[in-house]
């Protein structure tokens, strides 16, 4: 399983650590990866693309993606390229629309490995993200499960509902951008990611 965190978050985030600990206790057969994702789109795409390319070549078992917020966008981008299943949690559909708000500011990760790390987005980063967004065509081809809460104060859940139309969706009243009580879905999302690929790999 690959977990992709949100913008300016890190593998130390709550949902990431919750999944990691649940897998260690309940599904030790599943290998867990949670890379630190650069906020710079080209750097992120290159690193994530290389990681998934390597896993697809060398990993013997099925691969599933879980992404939160900006990580939901990257999960979708990777899933479309490699035909992988993905669970997206309050995902960003068009991240480039929000990026101009951060141009020229010193950006610090909310939770990270280095408290001294500072990022500064440029106009070119917005253009790069628009290019990655344009690579996603509709309808989506891979298998997705959208988890969203209408109380998300950062992203409009309706955009995700429309973007992932035709995919499995769970959209709840209330909640917030962090997706409250995410732990309710840990077992179900693991079943979704890996049971589908097992079925797909079995000859009919």
Image (tube, rainbow, N blue to C red):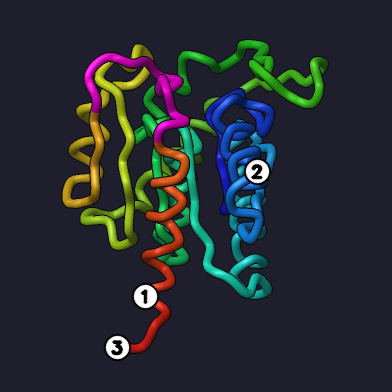
Which residue was labeled with disc 1?
200
Q: Residue 149: x and y, percent?
A: 29, 23
Which residue was labeled with disc 2?
34
Q: Nearer the viewer, residue 6 or 182?
A: 182
**Residue 77 visible:** yes
Indicate left or right for 70 with 176 as reference.
right
Residue at horizontal 39 percent and vertical 83 percent from the top: 202
Tell me, yes or no, whether the highlighted magenta stretch contains residue 180.
yes
Outermost residue to the bottom: 204
Look at the image and give the residue range highlighted in magenta.
Answer: 172-184
Q: How many marks?
A: 3
Residue 204: numbered disc = 3
Q: Residue 126: x and y, percent?
A: 48, 31
Residue at horizontal 65 percent and vertical 43 percent from the top: 34
Whether residues under marks 3 and 1 lie with C-beta atoms below 8 angstroms apart, the answer is no
**121 vs 200: above or below:** above
């Amino acid at each position: 399983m690959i977990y992709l965190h949100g913008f300016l978050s890190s593998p130390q985030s709550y949902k990431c650590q919750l999944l990691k600990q649940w897998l260690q206790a309940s599904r030790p057969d599943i290998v867990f990866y949670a890379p630190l994702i650069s906020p710079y789109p080209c750097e992120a795409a290159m690193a994530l693309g290389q990681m998934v390319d390597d896993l697809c070549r060398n990993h013997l078992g099925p691969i599933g993606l879980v992404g939160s917020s900006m990580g939901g966008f990257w999960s979708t981008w990777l899933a479309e390229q490699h035909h992988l299943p993905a669970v997206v949690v309050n995902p960003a559909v068009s991240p480039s629309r929000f990026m101009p708000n951060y141009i020229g500011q010193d950006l610090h990760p909310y939770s990270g490995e280095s408290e001294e790390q500072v990022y500064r987005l440029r106009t070119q980063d917005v253009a790069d993200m628009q290019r990655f967004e344009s690579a996603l065509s509709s309808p989506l081809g891979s298998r997705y499960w959208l988890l969203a809460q209408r109380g998300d104060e950062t992203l409009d859940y309706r955009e995700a509902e429309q973007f992932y139309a035709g995919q499995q969706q769970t959209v709840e009243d209330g909640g917030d951008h962090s997706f409250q009580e995410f732990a309710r879905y840990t077992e179900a999302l693991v079943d979704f990611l890996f049971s589908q690929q097992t079925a797909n790999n079995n000859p009919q």
